[in-house]
Amino acid sequence: MKSAGGAAAAPISLAKAGPKPERDEDDGHQPLVPPTPKFNMLPTGLSRAIVISALLAVSAAFMVAFVSGRYALTAPAATDTATVFRIDRLRGEVSVCTTLGCKVLEERAR
């Protein structure tokens, strides 16, 4: 090839000059190994906050269901009084409740 000045240009070589150096296995470099993931029982960071809040929400819902189902309110036969019978389903106690408060009734022997 001739250039604009009339002189021949040297051909461009894409290959590198000289042979490729071979890489030794023991050149002092450590091979790249991906880090092993940590398997912890407890999550960290944001996931820990999500797990804790979920546990608190479930326990709060359980306690509300437990406490709300513990007592049964029953009206007496006479409707002219402001009393209510409260039955404790957990302990089996019966209370009479008025506007002044509740009083636990004693068991009678049969």
Image (spheres, rainbow, N blue to C red):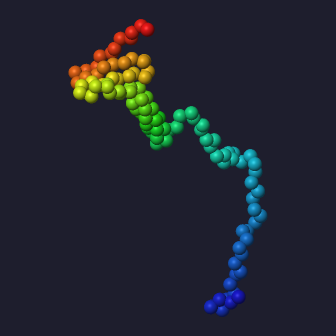
List the single residue furthest toward the top: 109
The residue closer to the viewer here, 70 or 85, is: 85
The residue closer to the viewer here, 60 or 78, is: 78
Q: Quadrant of the N terminus?
A: bottom right
Q: For residue 72, which quarter of the picture?
A: top left
- Residue 1 position (above or below residue 56): below
Q: Is residue 8 left or right of residue 37?
A: right
The residue closer to the viewer here, 61 or 94, is: 94
Q: For residue 89, which quarter of the picture?
A: top left
- Residue 102 position (above or below residue 22): above
The residue sitting at 68% across, 84% down in the picture is 9
Give the image location of residue 14, x and y in percent.
71, 73
Q: Is residue 74 left or right of residue 8?
A: left
List the single residue furthest toward the left: 100
Give the image location of residue 46, x and y in percent.
46, 42
- Residue 6 position (above or below residue 58): below
Q: Quadrant of the C terminus?
A: top left
